[in-house]
Amino acid sequence: MKKTFEDNDAGFTYILSKKGKDAYEMHNSAYLKKVKKITSDKECAIVLDRWMRFFRQGHIGVDYIAKDTVTGAVVGKSETIKVDTREFEKYLTDKKDPGYEGIWLSEPYKIGIKKTGDHYVGFIIETTAENWKAGEVKAKFNDDGGAYYTRNKTEVKFAKSGLKLEGKNDLQLGNFSLKRTYPVLKNDAETELDLKLLRSSKPFLEKLNATTLILRIPFFEITEKKYIDSVIRVNRATILATPNLIIDLRNNPGGSDESFEEILPFLYTNPIRSVGVDFLSTKLNNQRMLDLSNNTEFDEDSRKQLKKYYEKLEQSLGKFVSLSDQKVEIYKRDSVYTYPQQVGILINEKNGSTTEQFLLAAKQSKKVKLFGVTTYGMLDISHVHTLAFPCGKFELFYGLSRSYRIPGMAIDDIGLQPDYYIDGTIERNGWVKFANEVLNNK
Protein backbone atom coordinates (compact mmCIF):
# COMPACT_ATOMS: atom_id res chain seq x y z
CA MET A 1 0.00 0.00 0.00
CA LYS A 2 2.79 2.38 0.92
CA LYS A 3 4.54 1.95 -2.44
CA THR A 4 1.30 2.22 -4.41
CA PHE A 5 0.50 5.47 -2.64
CA GLU A 6 3.99 6.94 -3.02
CA ASP A 7 4.06 6.18 -6.74
CA ASN A 8 0.56 7.34 -7.63
CA ASP A 9 -0.84 9.97 -5.25
CA ALA A 10 -0.72 13.47 -6.74
CA GLY A 11 0.01 15.04 -3.35
CA PHE A 12 2.80 12.78 -2.12
CA THR A 13 5.82 14.73 -3.40
CA TYR A 14 4.27 18.07 -2.39
CA ILE A 15 3.76 17.05 1.25
CA LEU A 16 7.17 15.36 1.36
CA SER A 17 8.79 18.59 0.23
CA LYS A 18 6.95 20.49 2.99
CA LYS A 19 7.45 18.11 5.91
CA GLY A 20 10.77 16.57 4.92
CA LYS A 21 12.08 13.03 4.47
CA ASP A 22 13.27 12.75 8.07
CA ALA A 23 9.79 13.37 9.43
CA TYR A 24 8.38 10.85 6.97
CA GLU A 25 10.90 8.18 8.00
CA MET A 26 10.08 8.74 11.67
CA HIS A 27 6.37 8.41 10.84
CA ASN A 28 6.99 5.15 8.95
CA SER A 29 9.11 3.74 11.75
CA ALA A 30 6.40 4.41 14.33
CA TYR A 31 3.72 2.75 12.21
CA LEU A 32 5.86 -0.29 11.40
CA LYS A 33 5.87 -0.93 15.14
CA LYS A 34 2.11 -0.46 15.34
CA VAL A 35 1.27 -2.88 12.53
CA LYS A 36 3.17 -5.67 14.25
CA LYS A 37 0.61 -5.55 17.06
CA ILE A 38 -2.46 -5.75 14.82
CA THR A 39 -4.79 -8.67 15.58
CA SER A 40 -7.80 -8.03 13.30
CA ASP A 41 -8.63 -6.83 9.81
CA LYS A 42 -10.69 -3.90 11.07
CA GLU A 43 -7.83 -2.76 13.29
CA CYS A 44 -5.51 -3.07 10.30
CA ALA A 45 -7.74 -0.75 8.23
CA ILE A 46 -7.81 1.81 11.05
CA VAL A 47 -4.00 1.83 11.40
CA LEU A 48 -3.43 2.08 7.64
CA ASP A 49 -5.91 4.94 7.42
CA ARG A 50 -4.18 6.77 10.28
CA TRP A 51 -0.81 6.30 8.58
CA MET A 52 -2.15 8.30 5.64
CA ARG A 53 -3.04 11.30 7.82
CA PHE A 54 0.62 12.34 7.62
CA PHE A 55 -0.24 13.69 4.18
CA ARG A 56 -3.68 15.29 4.56
CA GLN A 57 -7.11 14.71 6.04
CA GLY A 58 -9.30 14.56 2.94
CA HIS A 59 -9.49 12.77 -0.43
CA ILE A 60 -7.35 10.01 1.04
CA GLY A 61 -7.72 6.92 3.20
CA VAL A 62 -8.22 3.19 3.66
CA ASP A 63 -11.63 1.59 4.16
CA TYR A 64 -12.45 -1.85 5.50
CA ILE A 65 -14.87 -3.41 3.00
CA ALA A 66 -15.03 -7.09 3.98
CA LYS A 67 -18.52 -8.23 4.89
CA ASP A 68 -19.21 -8.54 8.57
CA THR A 69 -19.85 -12.03 9.81
CA VAL A 70 -22.13 -10.86 12.62
CA THR A 71 -25.54 -12.55 12.46
CA GLY A 72 -28.79 -11.54 14.04
CA ALA A 73 -28.22 -13.88 16.94
CA VAL A 74 -28.31 -12.52 20.46
CA VAL A 75 -24.76 -11.97 21.70
CA GLY A 76 -25.61 -10.52 25.07
CA LYS A 77 -28.21 -10.45 27.78
CA SER A 78 -30.32 -7.43 28.53
CA GLU A 79 -31.73 -6.05 31.74
CA THR A 80 -35.46 -5.89 32.23
CA ILE A 81 -37.44 -3.32 34.18
CA LYS A 82 -41.13 -3.11 34.97
CA VAL A 83 -42.90 0.07 33.94
CA ASP A 84 -46.64 0.67 33.74
CA THR A 85 -47.01 2.54 30.43
CA ARG A 86 -50.19 4.35 31.46
CA GLU A 87 -48.65 5.51 34.72
CA PHE A 88 -45.53 6.56 32.82
CA GLU A 89 -47.61 8.65 30.39
CA LYS A 90 -49.39 10.32 33.32
CA TYR A 91 -46.00 10.98 34.93
CA LEU A 92 -44.84 12.65 31.72
CA THR A 93 -48.01 14.73 31.38
CA ASP A 94 -47.43 16.26 34.77
CA LYS A 95 -43.88 17.38 33.91
CA LYS A 96 -43.43 20.90 32.59
CA ASP A 97 -39.98 20.19 31.15
CA PRO A 98 -39.46 16.45 30.52
CA GLY A 99 -35.97 16.91 29.02
CA TYR A 100 -34.72 13.49 27.93
CA GLU A 101 -37.69 11.76 29.51
CA GLY A 102 -40.51 10.75 27.23
CA ILE A 103 -41.69 8.19 24.72
CA TRP A 104 -39.51 8.04 21.64
CA LEU A 105 -39.57 6.30 18.29
CA SER A 106 -36.53 4.75 16.63
CA GLU A 107 -37.78 2.17 14.13
CA PRO A 108 -38.56 -0.60 14.89
CA TYR A 109 -38.58 0.44 18.55
CA LYS A 110 -40.92 2.48 20.69
CA ILE A 111 -38.75 3.45 23.65
CA GLY A 112 -39.57 5.00 26.99
CA ILE A 113 -36.85 7.03 28.70
CA LYS A 114 -37.15 7.61 32.44
CA LYS A 115 -34.79 9.16 34.96
CA THR A 116 -33.77 6.82 37.75
CA GLY A 117 -31.49 8.32 40.37
CA ASP A 118 -28.68 10.17 38.56
CA HIS A 119 -29.05 8.41 35.21
CA TYR A 120 -31.62 7.71 32.50
CA VAL A 121 -32.91 4.32 31.40
CA GLY A 122 -34.38 3.67 27.97
CA PHE A 123 -36.69 0.66 27.86
CA ILE A 124 -38.71 -1.06 25.15
CA ILE A 125 -42.43 -0.29 25.08
CA GLU A 126 -43.19 -1.91 21.71
CA THR A 127 -41.11 -3.48 18.94
CA THR A 128 -41.29 -5.87 16.00
CA ALA A 129 -37.62 -6.84 16.40
CA GLU A 130 -37.30 -10.56 17.14
CA ASN A 131 -34.54 -10.19 19.73
CA TRP A 132 -36.32 -7.62 21.84
CA LYS A 133 -39.43 -7.51 24.00
CA ALA A 134 -41.26 -4.99 26.15
CA GLY A 135 -39.47 -3.99 29.34
CA GLU A 136 -35.93 -4.73 28.18
CA VAL A 137 -33.35 -1.97 28.61
CA LYS A 138 -32.34 -0.40 25.30
CA ALA A 139 -30.14 2.44 26.59
CA LYS A 140 -28.51 3.79 29.73
CA PHE A 141 -26.92 7.21 30.04
CA ASN A 142 -26.27 10.32 32.08
CA ASP A 143 -25.02 13.77 31.16
CA ASP A 144 -21.52 12.36 30.57
CA GLY A 145 -22.61 9.77 27.99
CA GLY A 146 -23.70 6.16 28.17
CA ALA A 147 -24.54 3.06 26.13
CA TYR A 148 -27.07 2.02 23.51
CA TYR A 149 -27.79 -1.63 22.75
CA THR A 150 -28.06 -2.63 19.09
CA ARG A 151 -30.44 -5.13 17.51
CA ASN A 152 -28.25 -8.08 18.54
CA LYS A 153 -27.81 -6.52 21.99
CA THR A 154 -24.23 -5.46 21.49
CA GLU A 155 -23.32 -2.51 23.69
CA VAL A 156 -22.30 0.64 21.82
CA LYS A 157 -20.94 3.35 24.08
CA PHE A 158 -21.20 7.06 23.35
CA ALA A 159 -19.47 10.03 24.95
CA LYS A 160 -20.91 13.26 26.29
CA SER A 161 -20.52 14.82 22.85
CA GLY A 162 -22.77 12.10 21.40
CA LEU A 163 -25.70 13.03 23.64
CA LYS A 164 -27.74 15.76 21.97
CA LEU A 165 -31.29 16.99 22.36
CA GLU A 166 -31.96 19.01 19.22
CA GLY A 167 -34.95 21.21 19.78
CA LYS A 168 -37.40 19.46 22.08
CA ASN A 169 -38.35 16.39 20.07
CA ASP A 170 -35.16 15.02 18.48
CA LEU A 171 -32.67 13.04 20.56
CA GLN A 172 -29.28 11.73 19.51
CA LEU A 173 -27.66 8.89 21.48
CA GLY A 174 -24.32 8.44 19.76
CA ASN A 175 -25.12 7.31 16.21
CA PHE A 176 -28.74 6.53 17.02
CA SER A 177 -31.59 9.00 16.43
CA LEU A 178 -34.88 9.07 18.33
CA LYS A 179 -38.03 11.14 17.68
CA ARG A 180 -40.26 12.11 20.59
CA THR A 181 -43.86 10.87 20.22
CA TYR A 182 -45.10 11.78 23.72
CA PRO A 183 -45.40 14.40 24.91
CA VAL A 184 -44.74 16.20 21.63
CA LEU A 185 -43.48 19.64 22.56
CA LYS A 186 -43.59 22.79 20.47
CA ASN A 187 -40.27 24.13 19.24
CA ASP A 188 -39.71 27.83 18.73
CA ALA A 189 -39.80 29.00 15.11
CA GLU A 190 -36.00 29.33 14.81
CA THR A 191 -35.39 25.76 16.03
CA GLU A 192 -38.12 24.36 13.79
CA LEU A 193 -36.59 26.03 10.74
CA ASP A 194 -33.07 24.91 11.70
CA LEU A 195 -34.18 21.29 12.04
CA LYS A 196 -36.07 21.47 8.75
CA LEU A 197 -32.98 22.81 6.98
CA LEU A 198 -30.48 20.33 8.38
CA ARG A 199 -32.76 17.28 8.24
CA SER A 200 -33.66 17.82 4.60
CA SER A 201 -32.14 15.36 2.13
CA LYS A 202 -33.25 17.40 -0.90
CA PRO A 203 -32.76 21.06 -1.86
CA PHE A 204 -35.57 23.52 -1.29
CA LEU A 205 -36.23 27.26 -1.18
CA GLU A 206 -38.62 29.18 1.03
CA LYS A 207 -39.39 32.74 2.00
CA LEU A 208 -37.79 33.79 5.29
CA ASN A 209 -39.34 37.26 5.34
CA ALA A 210 -40.39 40.02 2.93
CA THR A 211 -36.81 40.77 1.88
CA THR A 212 -35.00 37.42 2.26
CA LEU A 213 -35.17 33.90 0.81
CA ILE A 214 -33.32 30.86 2.07
CA LEU A 215 -32.06 28.12 -0.26
CA ARG A 216 -31.02 24.83 1.32
CA ILE A 217 -28.61 22.55 -0.58
CA PRO A 218 -27.64 19.41 1.42
CA PHE A 219 -25.42 17.86 -1.30
CA PHE A 220 -23.73 18.73 -4.58
CA GLU A 221 -23.65 15.11 -5.82
CA ILE A 222 -24.25 14.85 -9.57
CA THR A 223 -27.44 12.93 -8.80
CA GLU A 224 -28.74 16.06 -7.02
CA LYS A 225 -28.17 18.42 -9.96
CA LYS A 226 -31.63 17.83 -11.41
CA TYR A 227 -33.24 18.65 -8.05
CA ILE A 228 -31.12 21.77 -7.52
CA ASP A 229 -31.84 22.97 -11.06
CA SER A 230 -35.55 22.26 -10.61
CA VAL A 231 -35.76 24.32 -7.40
CA ILE A 232 -34.00 27.22 -9.10
CA ARG A 233 -36.15 26.97 -12.23
CA VAL A 234 -39.44 26.93 -10.28
CA ASN A 235 -38.36 29.84 -8.04
CA ARG A 236 -36.41 31.87 -10.58
CA ALA A 237 -38.84 34.81 -10.69
CA THR A 238 -39.03 34.97 -6.90
CA ILE A 239 -35.23 34.94 -6.54
CA LEU A 240 -34.89 37.74 -9.09
CA ALA A 241 -37.47 39.84 -7.21
CA THR A 242 -36.08 39.47 -3.67
CA PRO A 243 -33.24 41.64 -2.27
CA ASN A 244 -31.49 39.02 -0.12
CA LEU A 245 -30.68 35.35 -0.52
CA ILE A 246 -29.26 33.02 2.14
CA ILE A 247 -27.77 29.76 0.85
CA ASP A 248 -27.47 27.12 3.57
CA LEU A 249 -24.59 24.75 2.76
CA ARG A 250 -23.95 23.48 6.30
CA ASN A 251 -22.81 19.81 6.32
CA ASN A 252 -22.70 19.72 2.49
CA PRO A 253 -19.63 17.49 1.85
CA GLY A 254 -19.28 18.15 -1.89
CA GLY A 255 -20.04 16.25 -5.08
CA SER A 256 -19.80 17.54 -8.64
CA ASP A 257 -19.03 21.05 -9.93
CA GLU A 258 -21.83 20.69 -12.48
CA SER A 259 -24.38 20.73 -9.66
CA PHE A 260 -23.81 24.39 -8.81
CA GLU A 261 -23.64 25.79 -12.36
CA GLU A 262 -27.21 27.18 -12.28
CA ILE A 263 -26.59 29.05 -9.01
CA LEU A 264 -23.64 31.13 -10.20
CA PRO A 265 -25.63 33.56 -12.42
CA PHE A 266 -27.54 34.84 -9.36
CA LEU A 267 -24.26 35.60 -7.56
CA TYR A 268 -22.35 37.05 -10.49
CA THR A 269 -20.97 40.62 -10.37
CA ASN A 270 -17.63 40.29 -12.18
CA PRO A 271 -15.58 37.61 -13.99
CA ILE A 272 -14.92 34.56 -11.81
CA ARG A 273 -11.53 32.90 -12.07
CA SER A 274 -11.29 29.15 -11.54
CA VAL A 275 -7.75 27.76 -11.18
CA GLY A 276 -7.24 24.38 -12.84
CA VAL A 277 -5.37 21.18 -11.99
CA ASP A 278 -2.84 18.84 -13.50
CA PHE A 279 -2.90 15.05 -13.30
CA LEU A 280 -0.10 12.72 -12.24
CA SER A 281 0.53 10.33 -15.10
CA THR A 282 1.26 6.74 -14.03
CA LYS A 283 0.23 3.40 -15.48
CA LEU A 284 -2.20 2.79 -12.62
CA ASN A 285 -3.74 6.27 -12.75
CA ASN A 286 -4.02 6.26 -16.52
CA GLN A 287 -5.76 2.90 -16.48
CA ARG A 288 -8.63 4.59 -14.63
CA MET A 289 -8.96 7.10 -17.47
CA LEU A 290 -8.93 4.27 -20.01
CA ASP A 291 -11.61 2.39 -18.05
CA LEU A 292 -13.77 5.53 -18.03
CA SER A 293 -13.36 5.87 -21.79
CA ASN A 294 -14.79 2.35 -22.17
CA ASN A 295 -17.69 2.96 -19.79
CA THR A 296 -20.94 2.80 -21.76
CA GLU A 297 -22.71 4.97 -19.17
CA PHE A 298 -21.00 7.94 -20.85
CA ASP A 299 -22.11 9.19 -24.25
CA GLU A 300 -19.91 8.62 -27.27
CA ASP A 301 -18.44 12.14 -27.36
CA SER A 302 -17.46 11.91 -23.69
CA ARG A 303 -15.83 8.52 -24.21
CA LYS A 304 -13.81 9.88 -27.13
CA GLN A 305 -12.64 12.83 -25.04
CA LEU A 306 -11.65 10.53 -22.17
CA LYS A 307 -9.69 8.36 -24.61
CA LYS A 308 -7.78 11.47 -25.79
CA TYR A 309 -7.00 12.32 -22.18
CA TYR A 310 -5.67 8.80 -21.67
CA GLU A 311 -3.44 9.03 -24.74
CA LYS A 312 -2.11 12.42 -23.63
CA LEU A 313 -1.32 11.10 -20.14
CA GLU A 314 0.44 8.03 -21.53
CA GLN A 315 2.88 10.25 -23.42
CA SER A 316 4.24 11.73 -20.17
CA LEU A 317 4.55 8.91 -17.64
CA GLY A 318 5.88 10.04 -14.28
CA LYS A 319 5.01 13.68 -14.91
CA PHE A 320 2.15 16.04 -14.10
CA VAL A 321 -0.01 16.71 -17.14
CA SER A 322 -2.61 19.40 -17.82
CA LEU A 323 -5.67 18.07 -19.63
CA SER A 324 -6.84 21.59 -20.44
CA ASP A 325 -5.37 24.25 -22.69
CA GLN A 326 -5.81 26.84 -19.96
CA LYS A 327 -4.54 26.84 -16.39
CA VAL A 328 -7.24 29.30 -15.39
CA GLU A 329 -10.81 29.33 -16.68
CA ILE A 330 -12.70 32.62 -16.51
CA TYR A 331 -16.48 32.60 -16.17
CA LYS A 332 -18.10 35.68 -17.70
CA ARG A 333 -21.67 36.91 -18.12
CA ASP A 334 -22.99 39.81 -20.19
CA SER A 335 -25.18 41.14 -17.40
CA VAL A 336 -25.55 41.30 -13.61
CA TYR A 337 -28.91 40.65 -11.98
CA THR A 338 -30.24 43.50 -9.82
CA TYR A 339 -31.59 40.97 -7.31
CA PRO A 340 -30.46 39.37 -5.18
CA GLN A 341 -28.42 42.35 -4.03
CA GLN A 342 -26.82 40.45 -1.15
CA VAL A 343 -26.09 36.75 -0.73
CA GLY A 344 -25.11 35.17 2.58
CA ILE A 345 -23.78 31.62 2.51
CA LEU A 346 -23.83 29.50 5.68
CA ILE A 347 -20.73 27.28 5.99
CA ASN A 348 -19.26 24.95 8.61
CA GLU A 349 -16.49 22.46 9.31
CA LYS A 350 -18.18 19.69 7.29
CA ASN A 351 -17.94 21.52 3.97
CA GLY A 352 -15.26 20.14 1.67
CA SER A 353 -14.31 19.26 -1.89
CA THR A 354 -16.82 20.58 -4.47
CA THR A 355 -18.55 22.70 -1.82
CA GLU A 356 -15.26 24.52 -1.25
CA GLN A 357 -14.83 24.85 -5.01
CA PHE A 358 -18.23 26.55 -5.16
CA LEU A 359 -17.26 28.85 -2.28
CA LEU A 360 -14.04 29.84 -4.07
CA ALA A 361 -16.14 30.94 -7.03
CA ALA A 362 -18.92 32.53 -4.97
CA LYS A 363 -16.66 34.62 -2.74
CA GLN A 364 -15.28 36.43 -5.82
CA SER A 365 -18.67 38.10 -6.17
CA LYS A 366 -19.19 41.51 -4.59
CA LYS A 367 -22.64 40.34 -3.47
CA VAL A 368 -21.45 37.38 -1.41
CA LYS A 369 -20.44 37.03 2.23
CA LEU A 370 -19.70 33.75 4.04
CA PHE A 371 -21.18 33.15 7.49
CA GLY A 372 -20.17 30.44 9.96
CA VAL A 373 -16.90 28.68 10.75
CA THR A 374 -13.86 27.49 8.79
CA THR A 375 -14.55 24.72 6.27
CA TYR A 376 -12.97 21.24 6.30
CA GLY A 377 -10.09 21.89 3.88
CA MET A 378 -10.19 19.16 1.21
CA LEU A 379 -9.66 20.47 -2.30
CA ASP A 380 -6.04 20.89 -3.43
CA ILE A 381 -5.44 17.19 -4.17
CA SER A 382 -8.57 15.87 -5.82
CA HIS A 383 -10.15 13.52 -8.39
CA VAL A 384 -10.19 10.54 -6.05
CA HIS A 385 -9.27 7.09 -7.33
CA THR A 386 -10.48 4.05 -5.40
CA LEU A 387 -8.47 0.85 -5.60
CA ALA A 388 -9.25 -2.53 -4.01
CA PHE A 389 -6.46 -4.36 -2.19
CA PRO A 390 -5.59 -7.76 -3.73
CA CYS A 391 -7.07 -9.50 -0.66
CA GLY A 392 -10.42 -7.82 -1.27
CA LYS A 393 -10.76 -6.74 2.36
CA PHE A 394 -9.67 -3.11 2.01
CA GLU A 395 -9.90 -0.17 -0.37
CA LEU A 396 -7.28 2.51 -0.86
CA PHE A 397 -8.34 5.92 -2.11
CA TYR A 398 -6.03 8.74 -3.09
CA GLY A 399 -5.86 11.83 -5.34
CA LEU A 400 -5.04 11.92 -9.03
CA SER A 401 -4.79 15.68 -9.53
CA ARG A 402 -3.04 18.68 -7.98
CA SER A 403 -4.35 22.25 -8.05
CA TYR A 404 -2.30 25.08 -9.55
CA ARG A 405 -3.33 27.13 -6.50
CA ILE A 406 -0.73 25.47 -4.27
CA PRO A 407 1.36 26.64 -2.59
CA GLY A 408 0.07 30.18 -3.13
CA MET A 409 -3.44 29.47 -1.84
CA ALA A 410 -3.53 26.06 -0.21
CA ILE A 411 -6.86 24.83 1.19
CA ASP A 412 -6.14 21.24 2.26
CA ASP A 413 -6.07 20.96 6.07
CA ILE A 414 -6.65 24.73 6.25
CA GLY A 415 -10.13 25.37 4.90
CA LEU A 416 -11.89 28.57 3.88
CA GLN A 417 -12.67 31.15 6.52
CA PRO A 418 -15.99 32.99 6.85
CA ASP A 419 -16.37 36.72 6.42
CA TYR A 420 -18.62 36.69 9.48
CA TYR A 421 -17.44 34.23 12.12
CA ILE A 422 -20.38 32.78 14.09
CA ASP A 423 -18.86 32.14 17.50
CA GLY A 424 -19.87 29.53 20.06
CA THR A 425 -22.14 31.88 21.99
CA ILE A 426 -24.63 31.69 19.12
CA GLU A 427 -26.55 28.40 19.13
CA ARG A 428 -26.88 26.48 15.88
CA ASN A 429 -30.54 27.44 15.57
CA GLY A 430 -29.48 31.09 15.61
CA TRP A 431 -27.23 30.99 12.54
CA VAL A 432 -29.99 31.83 10.06
CA LYS A 433 -31.19 34.69 12.26
CA PHE A 434 -27.64 36.06 12.53
CA ALA A 435 -27.13 36.06 8.76
CA ASN A 436 -30.57 37.53 8.18
CA GLU A 437 -29.91 40.40 10.59
CA VAL A 438 -26.61 41.25 8.92
CA LEU A 439 -28.13 41.21 5.44
CA ASN A 440 -31.06 43.33 6.59
CA ASN A 441 -28.92 45.74 8.64
CA LYS A 442 -30.71 44.98 11.90
Image (tube, rainbow, N blue to C red):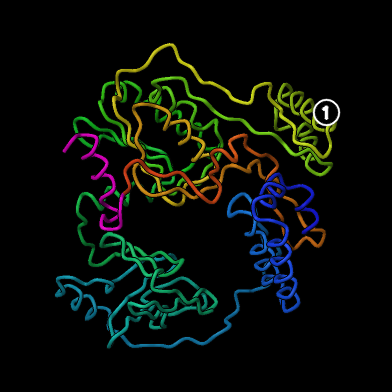
Q: Nearer the viewer, residue 174 or 110?
A: 174
Choose top left, top right, bottom left or bottom right for residue 95: bottom left
Q: Nearer the viewer, residue 138 or 53?
A: 53
Horizontal placement of 411 versus 281: left or right?
A: left
Placement of the C terminus among the 4 image quadrants: top left
Vertical placement of residue 119 versus 219, above or below: below
- Residue 222: within the magenta? no
Instruction: Give residue 23's position: percent from left, percent from top.
Output: 68, 62
Q: Residue sitting at 43 percent across and 88 percent down?
A: 79
Instruction: Give residue 327's position: percent from left, percent from top.
Output: 63, 26
| Segment colored magenta | 422-442
Horizontal placement of 26 versus 57: left or right?
A: right
Vertical placement of residue 110 versus 202, above or below: below
Choose top left, top right, bottom left or bottom right for residue 28: bottom right
Instruction: Give residue 255's position: percent from left, percent from top.
Output: 55, 40
Placement of the N terminus among the 4 image quadrants: bottom right
Q: Amino acid at mark 1?
A: Glu
Residue wearing tag 1: 311
Q: Residue sitting at 41 percent across and 44 percent down?
A: 417
Instruction: Give residue 88's position: percent from left, percent from top.
Output: 24, 79
Q: Residue sitting at 81 percent across and 41 percent down?
A: 282
Horizontal placement of 202 versus 58: left or right?
A: left
Question: Is residue 64 in view from this perspective?
Answer: no
Q: Secondary structure at mark 1?
A: helix
Horizontal placement of 355 versus 366: left or right?
A: right
